[in-house]
Image: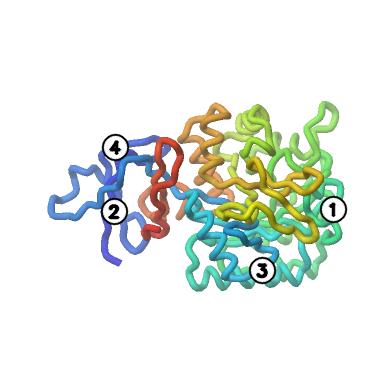
Amino acid sequence: MSVKVLHADKILLSGKFVSNQAIIIEHGKIIDIAPLQNIPTSTVVEEIPKGFLIPGLIDIQVNGGGGTLFNDDPSVTTIETIGTAHRKFGTTTFFPTLISDDLEKISMAIAAVDEAIRIGVPGVAGIHIEGPFLSKEKKGIHDAGKFKCLKPEDIKLLSSLKSGKTLITLAPETNDGKLISQLVKSGIIIAAGHSNASYEQTIAGVKAGITGFTHLYNAMSPFQSREPGVVGAAFESTDTWASIIADGFHVHPAAIKHAIKAKGTNKTILITDAMPTVGSPKNEFWLGSEKIIAAGGKCTNKDGVLAGSNLDMISAVKYIAENVGYSLEDAVKMASLSPATFMGLDNELGTIAVGKKANFILMSEKFDVLNVWINGVQY
């Protein structure tokens, strides 16, 4: 691949928007960022239309998109479909997410992600296994009939991804802390979620190696005066990250603001928890035996229980910037650098910087995604 030089009107560098800078790309990586006037006049510079050039967005929890659900068909084709659907909304890195299912389905999903990474499906960086090691009391839309407790013989399967990162969401109170530690030692990133744990049980889980909290506030024991619960433990544990679904339905903006104040923008992660309706004209799908309808911006079953979301990443960024009182720069950080750091990928993703992958998007003032680049390739 030849050297490519891009110039954008406003580029987000080191947390601030700057002008008159050129990005030099080779072999899919940024090899230099220099003032435009320093670029030789003989060099062909590709002028990017006016807008905001920001790092590619990273979604660590995406169940579906483009009309497909990962659980229904954990295959490379499904992963490609999900990636294509979310790419138009600025997601350049994603983790296909498997909702609680049988171990056989988990095995299929891991194999599919491995193959997708091997053949170079754009954007896929690993897998998120959300369950089945969860709490029945906080099952949300998950099928509690699939739930189980971690067993020593599960470690080999759960840590079998050959390439990329593995994230597992589990309930700390229903699983042996020693097994959680074994998962962490095998290279897996663990988040607490769908949990009715006490504050003390959750802190014990953090000591065992839990470093994240999945969709903070939702499907977890709440913060109360005499029982801080999982939410209180998330606020207290400063070395952990917390993901939030910022769609206006899952969490009140005041609660989001409090969470960001407690965790900081470095430790708050925006996710979609997206379902098949994102990037698709379909407004309904089946989740196991339950029919889910997408209407008014949210996905619910017949009883009104939220079932994932109809959210995309650029809309999450927009919601934070317009409704929660944080800057665009901070909103972008929570959708790029924060998830990259949590997943141990910040050496190559999360910011526009020398040595990192040339993953970025061009966004308009109205938060429309105008262009997307992954590894220097424009889509």
Mark 1–mark 2 Cα distance, whole angstroms, equals: 50 Å
Disc 4: which residue: 19
Q: Quadrant of residue 116?
A: bottom right
As shown in the figure, which amino acid type bears the numbered disc 3? Asp
Disc 3: which residue: 73
Q: Position of residue 313 (x, y in %)?
A: 54, 46
Q: Earlier in the sequence, mark 3 or mark 2?
A: 2
Mark 4–mark 2 Cα distance, whole angstroms, equals: 15 Å
Q: Which mark is residue 174?
A: 1
As shown in the figure, which amino acid type bears the numbered disc 1? Thr
Residue 257 lies, with reference to residue 48, above or below; the image says: above
Q: Looking at the image, do the residues carrying marks 4 and 3 touch, with CB atoms under 8 Å apart?
A: no
Q: Secondary structure at mark 1?
A: helix
Residue at the location (54% across, 65% down)? 80
Q: Along the horizontal axis of the image, is 202 left or right of 353? A: right
Disc 2: which residue: 24
As shown in the figure, which amino acid type bears the numbered disc 2? Ile
Q: Earlier in the sequence, mark 3 or mark 1?
A: 3
Mark 3–mark 2 Cα distance, whole angstroms, equals: 39 Å
